[in-house]
Image (spheres, coloured by chain):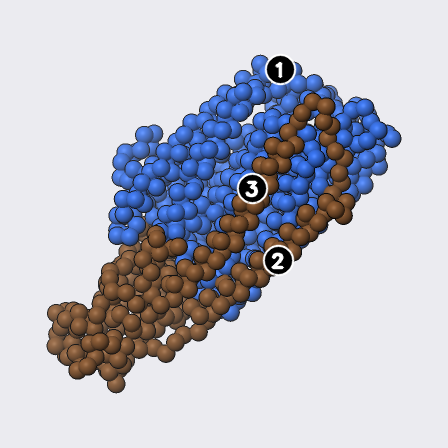
């Protein structure tokens, strides 16, 4: 079947569920990710209620028992990383934007793309099915350390543990397929004239993130297969009484797990770069330096993994090496953030909703970054490891990544995706209603962590130092702030869905942006470009002297 | 700084607290500088009529130094932090001062159990002092511990001592602590270990040699207690245990 046949008008099912169009697949990923985010948010609501108001009936859930609590925190973490951050940041934005931004009609392998989403959907369904099996969903933390995860006798959720593992493995298959597709498309399908240094930063970041993902996923998949064998065939890969070693899993998991942080961070940084350039009307400060720091981060992310294992029983001398590499990775990351801040210099900044989100990303991510230093430093990690300080730290990185940058991206490209504008007033209400409570949730948790609150505890009654009333006040404060933050998401959902139908018509280029996706109609037709574009310049030509407009699109000749 | 939030009750707690303070000062300065710069630029370069945007690539030398100088300074700060981190780590985890006594700590779903040598000073003999959930130690005495797990991974943590070490099934991990403040402190399990993870609490009671002897007498009979009440030892916990070992 030649690709041109696809231009015949397909049926509803063909169009929305069996499509190979990158934009439709992007929407599938986006809406699946948003649905999973609601579920992950609901879980956070339930276990934070238990922490804020221990042993009370939680409205909409009931009593939180220790087993349910463990399952809730495990599922919250797994879902937010594997079924929200990954599909939305990499797959939804990658799928929608790569062909549009590099100036081609679709992904290099459209059917692999369709298969990727279908496997992803199955992985989500496998995970959700674990709520229906005997014993319930897995509760051994998202890190799934054996022997706890390897034996039903220890975790009491034999089926749930296996379903969790299978779901994660399937999710990886989906993203390996996607990763190949994204990388090949960005490298090979660029419009004529588009040199490597003419690629928008976002595309580079998604490509580098995918390369990092593909290079790090292998060890974890190998580890997952061994864990699956331990669970289902009573092998002993992680059982020390039979020659196995639980530390092996920790190494394989974190060899993947730490690069994964950067896999989701980089696309978020990319989104922020695009939004900041447009709303500051500025070329990205030091485009090439941003690119080199990204490569440096991607490379260094492979040699820091054991900082998750300082006190795990590894040779203590190893901690010194991993402390050094961890401090080193702070150098390119800070440099990248400095370059973003420097981009504002000399600009003409307007604070539209997408820009508020993008600037909030920088402001909040800085806090996440500096608090990581306490944990990367082996000496202080002895005390802080597995406390709420860690939780507060990585939520100051992951919330900017998976929530703040995603909202920057959605509010920025909504006009392109659906051809209509979102409401700015509601957008700003939603912004402040999310960002302020976010800080009120996690700043108190830094303090409870410093005071010694360990993670994954459903009730601190057993611990005299942690059941002090002043710490309980902090936990309650965090819970109340979460309720406020969650309730403001209703504003977003209303704005999103009402704007789909009633939003002001957007036109092709409402933000007066210079990249290629804004040169096509909104929403872009099947095949994207009526005539494939030729590129003459870089992606951020704002304020170029000698031009009437303050921006020059990439496809405009000199 | 940490002591404001939780008592420090071991000899190395203060070195960890000082390192925390050092890092807090360094990153605090950077955080304030970066956030101030961010907000200052947002304000200074807000869109105003008649002021066009400037065309800056970021390759200009006089502007680039705004990045390269901070870049070098970050590197210097990293080195300072690395030196601090490694020296604290070395002191706490890599070397062990001579022991006054060696104890054994065993984690299992979902309790901590402890084994201390009896008057013979040797573990695994008939006079061992065994306890579950509660560990009595003498102040200013250096203990080595052998950490083990019977089932899954646990983590032996005494926040007041700033002590944390995972317990792995199949191996024995050595560590040490010297309590220097009398009192009762929490023992936590900080690694998810299953259904009863939140119930896996213990207490460590740091007491004077005299109180320790009284506790021994009450719970384990005069044989153990007599050894702890050697003359002249009441003021010096370390020597008590040394005597016990002899």
Mark 2 Cα shell of 10 Å, populated few (<14), some (14-19), many (≥20): some
**Residue position marked by numbered label 1 in the rendering:** A504
Query: Which one is nearer the viewer's eye here, B145 or B37?
Result: B37
Q: Residues within 10 Å of mark 3 (few under 14, many from 20)?
A: some
Q: Let me know if marks 2 and 3 both belong to one chain.
A: yes
Residue topped by disc 3: B35
In the image, which lettered chain appears brown?
A: B
Disc 1 chain ID = A
Tag 3, which chain? B
Closest to the observer, A370 or B198:
A370
Q: Residue lying at the far bottom in this picture: please name it.
A: B246
Report whether A525 appears left or right of B156: right
The image quadrant of residue A421 is top right
Q: Position of residue B129 (x, y in %)?
A: 22, 72
Q: Which residue is mark 2?
A: B75
Position of residue A133 measured from the top left corner of the image (x, y, whole percent):
39, 40
* Placement of A495 over or under B30, stated as above or below: above
Q: Which chain is blue?
A: A
Helix, strand or loop at label 3? It is: helix
């Amino acid at each position: 079947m030649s690709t041109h046949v696809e231009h015949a008008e397909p049926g509803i099912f063909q169009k929305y569920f069996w499509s190979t169009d990158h934009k439709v697949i992007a929407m599938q990923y986006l809406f699946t990710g948003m649905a999973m985010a609601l579920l992950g948010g609901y879980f956070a609501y339930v276990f934070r209620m238990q922490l804020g108001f221990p042993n009370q009936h939680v409205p909409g859930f009931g009593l939180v028992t220790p087993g349910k609590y463990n399952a809730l925190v495990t599922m919250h973490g797994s879902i937010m990383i594997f079924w929200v951050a990954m599909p939305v940041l990499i797959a939804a934005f990658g799928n929608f934007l790569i062909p549009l931004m590099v100036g081609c009609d679709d992904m290099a392998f459209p059917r692999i793309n369709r298969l990727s989403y279908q496997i992803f959907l199955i992985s989500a369904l496998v995970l959700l099915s674990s709520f229906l099996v005997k014993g319930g969903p897995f509760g051994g933390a998202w890190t799934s350390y054996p022997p706890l995860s390897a034996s039903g006798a220890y975790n009491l959720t034999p089926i749930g543990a296996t379903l969790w593992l299978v779901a994660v493995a399937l999710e990886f298959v989906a993203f390996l397929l996607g990763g190949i597709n994204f990388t090949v498309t960005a490298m090979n399908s660029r419009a004529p004239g588009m040199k490597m240094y003419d690629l928008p930063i976002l595309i580079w970041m998604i490509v580098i993130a995918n390369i990092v993902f593909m290079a790090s996923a292998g060890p974890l998949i190998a580890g997952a297969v061994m864990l699956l064998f331990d669970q289902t065939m009573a092998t002993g890969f992680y059982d020390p009484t039979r020659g196995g070693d639980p530390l092996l899993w920790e190494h394989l998991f974190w060899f993947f797990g730490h690069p994964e942080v950067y896999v989701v961070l980089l696309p978020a940084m990319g989104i922020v770069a695009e939004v900041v350039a447009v709303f500051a009307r500025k070329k990205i400060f030091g485009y090439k330096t941003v690119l080199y720091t990204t490569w440096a981060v991607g490379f260094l992310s492979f040699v820091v993994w054991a900082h998750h294992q300082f006190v795990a029983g590894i040779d203590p001398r190893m901690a010194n090496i991993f402390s050094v590499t961890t401090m080193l990775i702070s150098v390119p990351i800070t440099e990248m953030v400095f370059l973003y801040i420097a981009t504002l210099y000399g600009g003409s900044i307007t604070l539209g909703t997408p820009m508020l989100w993008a600037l909030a990303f920088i402001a909040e991510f800085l806090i996440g970054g500096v608090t990581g230093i306490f944990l990367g430093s082996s000496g202080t990690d002895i005390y802080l490891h597995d406390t709420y300080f860690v939780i507060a730290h990585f939520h100051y990185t992951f919330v900017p990544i998976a929530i703040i940058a995603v909202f920057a991206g959605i509010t920025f490209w909504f006009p392109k995706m659906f051809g209509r504008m979102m409401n700015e007033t509601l957008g700003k209400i939603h912004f402040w209603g999310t960002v302020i409570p976010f800080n009120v949730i996690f700043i108190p948790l830094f303090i409870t962590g410093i005071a010694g609150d360990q993670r994954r505890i459903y009730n601190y009654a057993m611990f005299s130092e942690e059941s002090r009333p002043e710490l309980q006040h902090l936990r309650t404060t965090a819970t109340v702030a979460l309720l406020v933050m969650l309730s403001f998401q209703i504003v977003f959902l209303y704005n999103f869905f009402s704007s789909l139908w009633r939003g002001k018509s957007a036109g092709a280029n409402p933000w007066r942006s210079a990249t290629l996706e804004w040169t096509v109609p909104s929403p872009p037709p099947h095949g994207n470009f009526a005539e494939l574009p030729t590129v003459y310049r870089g992606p951020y030509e704002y304020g170029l002297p000698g031009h009437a407009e303050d921006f020059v699109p990439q496809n405009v000749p000199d | 700084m940490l002591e404001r939030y939780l008592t420090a009750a071991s000899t190395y707690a203060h070195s960890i607290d000082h390192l925390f303070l050092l890092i807090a000062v360094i990153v605090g300065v950077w955080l304030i500088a970066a956030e101030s710069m961010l907000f200052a630029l947002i304000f200074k370069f807000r869109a105003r009529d008649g002021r066009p945007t400037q065309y800056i690539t970021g390759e200009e030398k006089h502007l680039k130094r705004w990045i390269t100088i901070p870049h070098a300074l970050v590197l210097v700060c990293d080195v300072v932090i690395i030196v601090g981190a490694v020296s604290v780590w070395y002191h706490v985890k890599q070397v062990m001062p001579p022991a006054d006594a060696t104890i054994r700590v065993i984690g299992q779903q979902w309790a901590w159990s402890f084994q201390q040598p009896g008057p013979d000073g040797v573990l695994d003999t008939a006079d061992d002092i065994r306890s579950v959930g509660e560990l009595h130690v003498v102040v200013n005495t250096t203990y080595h511990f052998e950490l083990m797990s019977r089932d899954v991974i646990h983590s032996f943590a005494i926040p007041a001592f700033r002590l944390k070490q995972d317990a792995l099934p199949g191996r024995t991990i050595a560590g040490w602590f010297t309590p220097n403040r009398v009192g009762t402190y929490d023992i936590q399990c900080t690694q998810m270990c299953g259904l009863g993870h939140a119930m896996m609490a213990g207490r460590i009671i740091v007491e004077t040699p005299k109180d320790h002897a009284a506790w021994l007498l009450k719970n384990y009979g005069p044989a153990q207690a007599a050894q702890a009440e050697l003359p002249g030892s009441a003021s010096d916990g370390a020597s008590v245990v040394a005597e016990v070992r002899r």
